[in-house]
């Protein structure tokens, strides 16, 4: 059963797009939009692709998921995902995904043989009621955590449980393995908004259905000790302005 007609009408109204406006974007007559929404006509494949771009929805969700009744596909309860874990004396070990292995992890995260080949370790003081995985960071997008820092995350079974403003390691079909501060808009538009702590990097969105695994950060391991006024943090124009004001204030005190 196709939900194209009802989804088209629902998403169009939700986004405040009139039939005339949508018709202009598709280069068709308004009556054609009405026919699509009434189920009297179906758009061709090229038009469908354009519709999915305009309405910001995946083709599979547009055609086969009842968005109005059930909500966005990304918030639906996921099937049971059997994680491959390593044990030692009946205790779960933490499997570590080094930065160089992150590309292979996309293909091997459900392969027991591949997972057993990755480094494993154990840490005290972590809750025993969760499954953990460790990922080595690359790049400086999440300063003050520097490249090489190991982030330990607990497995998030359902994407709807992602808490806005918290940091997560996401294993994705489109962006690979990423560590970002995440804002959850799955209920509104089926997407997650990913933000870097280093403001030199632009935020971006990712569709919920492109997320293969999510791990909420719980701890990190680093050989770099915190430094007051972390010198690795980029200096902003506001920082420079405050520094200049402080210098001017000191000069006035000296002159006085």
Image (cartoon, rainbow, N blue to C red):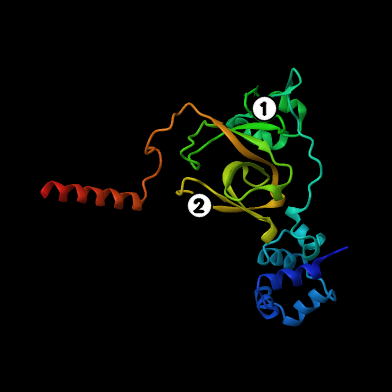
Describe the element under mark 1 as helix, strand or loop.
strand
State the residue lying farthest toward the left: 255
Percent of width and height locating residue 61: 77, 59
Q: Nearer the viewer, residue 119 or 197?
A: 197
Q: Nearer the viewer, mark 1 or mark 2?
A: 1
The answer to whether the residue labelled 1 contacts the one labelled 2, judged by CB atoms less than 8 Å apart, is: no
Percent of width and height locating residue 255: 11, 49
Tell me how far mark 1 sits from mark 2, CA to CA.
Answer: 30 Å
Q: Residue at x 70, y 73 (%)?
A: 13
Q: Is residue 183 left or right of residue 93?
A: left
Percent of width and height locating residue 179: 58, 41
**Residue 95, numbered label:** 1
Q: Nearer the viewer, residue 100 or 210?
A: 210
- Report the quarter where the N terminus lies: bottom right
Q: Residues within 10 Å of mark 1 (few under 14, many from 20)?
A: many
Q: Residue at x 71, y 50 (%)?
A: 160
Where residue 102 sits, quadrant-wise, is top right
Percent of width and height locating residue 245: 25, 52
Describe the element under mark 2 as helix, strand or loop.
loop
Q: Is residue 110 left or right of residue 248?
A: right
Residue topped by disc 2? 202
Eyeballing the image, is 16 above or below 163?
below
State the residue lying farthest toward the top: 89
**Residue 216, numbered label:** none
Q: Is residue 208 left or right of residue 167?
A: right
Q: Residue at x 35, y 53 (%)?
A: 238
Considering only order in the chain, which callout, 2 or 1, is on the residue closer to the N terminus? 1
State the residue lying farthest toward the right: 1
Eyeballing the image, is 148 above or below 15?
above
Q: Residues within 10 Å of mark 2 (few under 14, many from 20)?
A: few
Q: Nearer the viewer, residue 223 or 200?
A: 223
Where residue 132 sits, quadrant-wise, is top right
């Amino acid at each position: 059963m196709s939900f194209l007609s009802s989804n088209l009408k629902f998403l169009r109204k939700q986004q405040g797009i009139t039939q005339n406006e949508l018709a202009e974007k598709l280069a068709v007559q308004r009556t054609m939009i009405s026919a699509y929404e009434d189920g009297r006509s179906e758009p061709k494949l090229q038009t469908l692709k354009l519709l999915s771009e305009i309405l910001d929805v995946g083709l599979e969700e547009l055609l086969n998921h009842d968005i109005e009744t059930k909500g966005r596909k990304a918030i639906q309860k996921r099937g049971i995902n059997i994680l491959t874990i390593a044990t030692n004396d009946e205790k779960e070990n933490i499997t570590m995904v080094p930065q160089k292995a992150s590309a292979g992890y996309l293909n091997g995260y459900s392969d027991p043989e591949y997972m057993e080949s990755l480094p494993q370790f154990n840490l005290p003081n972590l809750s025993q009621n969760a499954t953990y995985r460790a990922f080595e960071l690359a790049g400086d997008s999440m300063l003050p955590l520097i490249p090489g820092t190991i982030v330990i995350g607990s497995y998030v079974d359902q994407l709807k449980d992602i808490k806005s403003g918290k940091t997560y390691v996401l294993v994705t079909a489109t962006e690979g393995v990423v560590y970002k501060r995440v804002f959850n808009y799955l209920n509104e538009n089926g997407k997650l908004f990913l933000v870097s702590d280093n403001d030199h990097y632009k935020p971006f969105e990712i569709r919920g259905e492109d997320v293969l695994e999510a791990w909420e950060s719980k701890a990190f391991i680093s050989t770099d000790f915190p430094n007051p006024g972390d010198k690795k943090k980029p200096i902003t124009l506001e920082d420079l302005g405050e520094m200049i004001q402080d210098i001017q204030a000191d000069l006035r005190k000296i002159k006085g």
